[in-house]
């Protein structure tokens, strides 16, 4: 099974491909708007930051190659305190658009309550379980946000609205939207580089998180090879 992996930036893409050694130019396949770096069963794409860039990049790659059996949104992310510490790995039980909705006099209302759109994508449960077991990742909701949380108040508001949130990042929901349109399942895997809360960029442990991502992808191949057709319909 070939797997499309979508990261935000090249450093995250290279952390994934590093699990399989360096990628030579001959292993880069160009599709409109991006280069796919081929490593093991993965085609890895740095699609840009934020849900719109991620959705556009994933959609182009998926439309260029009908052979993908799975799409993974991967990279670093923020972890909610007490749930996902810096250095941990999170696999999404659910991939959610945390701020897709309307602000009203009584608070935030998700688009689904306004009568349109969707706010969650559900990765196949069996695969989430197996990936978590193989990599030592914890599982929980991963929120997609367009603005990195920078205050304790905003972190608390997100947790109040989404009590099962483990982590936040900026691309997962966009990747999952593209995957859903073409009927391919999606996963999200985040290595936690920082705590969700008051902004302290100097405290971000990006190197450690990228190393955790490399280690995790090195462990994924047997899991994906063993993922059966039956399991693929277990969502
Ligand atoms: O500066 C670097 O060397 C560097 C290396 C790798 C990645 C980065 C990024 O800044 C990646 C941006 C990407 O990270 C996600 N992210 C990380 N922490 C958070 C967070 O607390 N809240 C939301 N998103 C987060 C996000 O997906 C960004 O697109 C830099």
Image (cartoon, grey):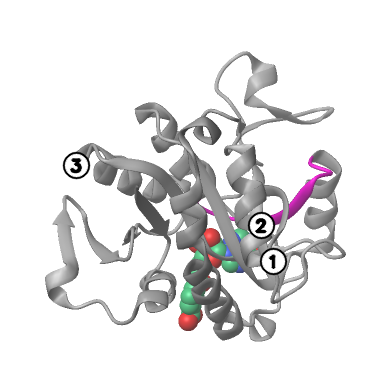
Q: Residues within 10 Å of mark 1 (few under 14, many from 20)?
A: some
Q: Are marks 1 and 2 in contact (CB under 8 Å)?
A: yes
For ligand 1, give the image quadrant: bottom right
Query: Given the current orientation, which residue lies at the most extreme top position?
Result: 115
Q: Is mark 3 within 8 Å of ligand 1?
A: no
Residue range (magenta) = 162-171
Vertical side of 19 occupied by 159: above or below: above
The residue that disc 1 covers is: 136
Q: Residue at x 14, y 75 (%)?
A: 25
Q: Residue 97 location in percent, x, y? A: 61, 39
Disc on res. 2: none
Residue 170 belongs to the span the image colors magenta: yes
The residue that disc 2 covers is: 132
Q: CA distance from mark 3 to mark 2?
A: 30 Å
As drawn, is 109 to the left or to the right of 225?
A: right
Going from N to C along the chain, the mark reached first, 3 or 1, is 3
The residue that disc 3 covers is: 64
Q: CA distance from mark 3 to mark 1?
A: 33 Å
Q: Are marks 3 and 2 in contact (CB under 8 Å)?
A: no
As drawn, is 188 to the left or to the right of 162?
A: left
Q: Residue at x 25, y 76 (%)?
A: 23
């Amino acid at each position: 099974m070939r797997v499309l992996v979508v990261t935000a930036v090249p450093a995250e893409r290279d952390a994934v491909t590093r699990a399989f050694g360096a990628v030579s130019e001959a292993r880069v396949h160009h599709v409109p708007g991006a280069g796919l770096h081929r490593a093991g069963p993965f085609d890895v794409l740095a699609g840009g930051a934020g849900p719109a860039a991620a959705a556009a990049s994933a959609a182009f790659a998926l439309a260029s190659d009908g052979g993908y059996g799975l799409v993974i949104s991967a990279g670093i992310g923020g972890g909610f305190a007490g749930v996902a510490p810096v250095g941990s790995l999170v696999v999404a039980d659910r991939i959610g658009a945390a701020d897709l909705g309307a602000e009203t006099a009584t608070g935030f209302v998700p688009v689904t309550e306004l009568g349109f759109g969707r706010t969650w994508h559900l990765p196949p449960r069996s695969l989430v379980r197996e990936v978590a077991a193989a990599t030592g990742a914890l599982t929980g909701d991963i929120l997609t946000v367009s603005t990195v949380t920078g205050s304790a108040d905003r972190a608390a508001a997100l947790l109040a609205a989404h009590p099962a949130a483990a982590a936040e990042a900026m691309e997962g929901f966009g990747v999952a939207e593209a995957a859903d349109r073409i009927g391919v399942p999606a996963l999200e895997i985040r290595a936690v580089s920082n705590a969700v809360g008051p902004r302290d960029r100097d405290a971000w442990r990006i190197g450690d998180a990228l190393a955790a991502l490399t280690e995790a992808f090195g462990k994924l191949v047997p899991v994906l090879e063993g993922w059966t057709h039956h399991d693929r319909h277990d969502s």
